[in-house]
């Protein structure tokens, strides 16, 4: 009986993964048809191109790089577009094993996680890239002619998108820690100085070696940590009230 249940869970997991992959594939095909992988890469490269001297173009050192890199960018955008549906499939898989109060808490948590991750990516693209690229271009010696490689730029973009997307999930992590009872809001307040130092250390590791980009990642990390503490305080109070109400109802004759 237990083996049948385990196999059914594996089949359900395979089905959910397949649905998620099909959603990403469908988004990829639509983006490939319109506006096209070339246009998508041009959009991704726009912050860098605007910061470089007029007439500067990016280069491709590999034989198939001009084809593969735009395809990778299209796949990245397709995943971001399909992310809500992918998370919905993950939610559908774990939902049957949750209690009602856990389902009530999990749904807004999934929505918030998706919005925060996409907000981090948007913040990186629209605000960080332009500022950092202009700073680097102004700092570079005038005797240097910039010729960025498209594959190196794509790797840089992926790293920065992941760094800022994950960073913007800090409020969700704080809320989960407090809601699960692993740590209290008061304890998180006590470790605030260590969190600030850790934020700058993480920013120094995952961002380019310039102070501006490190500061632009560390500052949101600190602010989002404070936002998580603010939200967790109210969620923790509501959870205690709900628990006391449930205990009162269960002990009443």
Image (cartoon, helix red, strand yellow):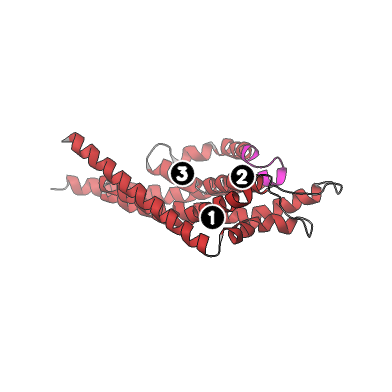
Check the picture and name the quadrant holding the N terminus: top left
Element under disc 2 = helix
Q: Residue at x 72, y 59 (%)?
A: 50
| Image-based side of 23 in relation to 206, left or right | left
Q: Residue at x 59, y 36 (%)?
A: 198
Element under disc 1 = helix
Outermost residue to the bottom: 34
Q: Is residue 94 visible?
A: no
Q: Residue 129's x, y, as percent?
A: 66, 53
Q: Main secondary structure of the magenta part?
A: helix
Q: Quadrant of residue 218?
A: top right
Q: Which residue is mark 3?
A: 173
Q: Nearer the viewer, residue 206 or 59?
A: 59
Q: Nearer the viewer, residue 140 or 252?
A: 140
State which mark lies toward you, 3 or 2: 2
Does residue 80 sit above or below 173 in this rendering? below
Pointer 3 with pointer 2, Cβ within 8 A: no
Q: Residue at x 69, y 47 (%)?
A: 149
State which mark lies toward you, 3 or 1: 1
State which mark lies toward you, 2 or 1: 1
Q: Residue at x 48, y 53 (%)?
A: 79
Q: Which residue is mark 2?
A: 155
Element under disc 3 = helix
Q: Residue 169's x, y, as percent?
A: 50, 47
Judge the density around disc 1: few (<14), some (14-19), many (≥20) Cα neighbours within 10 Å: many
Judge the density around disc 3: few (<14), some (14-19), many (≥20) Cα neighbours within 10 Å: some
Q: Is residue 250 visible?
A: yes
Region of the chain picked out in magenta, as a range: 203-214
Pointer 3 with pointer 1, Cβ within 8 A: no
């Amino acid at each position: 009986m237990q083996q049948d249940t385990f196999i059914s869970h594996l089949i359900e997991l395979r089905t959910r993964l397949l649905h998620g992959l099909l959603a990403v594939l469908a988004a990829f095909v639509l983006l490939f048809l319109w506006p096209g992988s070339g246009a998508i890469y041009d959009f991704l490269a726009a912050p860098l191109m605007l910061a470089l001297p007029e007439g500067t173009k990016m280069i491709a050192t590999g034989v198939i790089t001009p084809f593969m890199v735009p395809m990778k960018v299209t796949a990245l955008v397709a995943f971001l577009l399909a992310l809500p549906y992918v998370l919905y499939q993950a939610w559908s898989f774990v939902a049957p094993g949750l209690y009602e109060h856990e389902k009530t808490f999990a749904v807004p948590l999934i929505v918030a996680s998706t919005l925060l991750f996409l907000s981090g990516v948007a913040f990186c693209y629209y605000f960080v890239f332009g500022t950092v690229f202009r700073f680097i271009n102004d700092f570079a010696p005038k005797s240097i002619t910039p010729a960025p490689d498209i594959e190196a730029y794509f790797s840089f973009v992926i790293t920065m998108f992941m760094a800022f997307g994950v960073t913007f999930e800090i409020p969700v992590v704080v809320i989960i820690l407090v809601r699960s009872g692993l740590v209290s809001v008061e304890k998180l307040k006590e470790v605030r100085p260590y969190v600030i130092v850790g934020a700058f250390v993480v920013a120094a590791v995952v961002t380019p070696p310039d102070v501006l980009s490190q500061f632009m990642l560390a500052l949101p990390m600190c602010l989002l940590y404070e936002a998580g503490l603010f939200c967790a305080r109210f969620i923790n109070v509501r959870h205690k009230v709900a628990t006391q109400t449930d205990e009162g109802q269960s002990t009443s004759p």
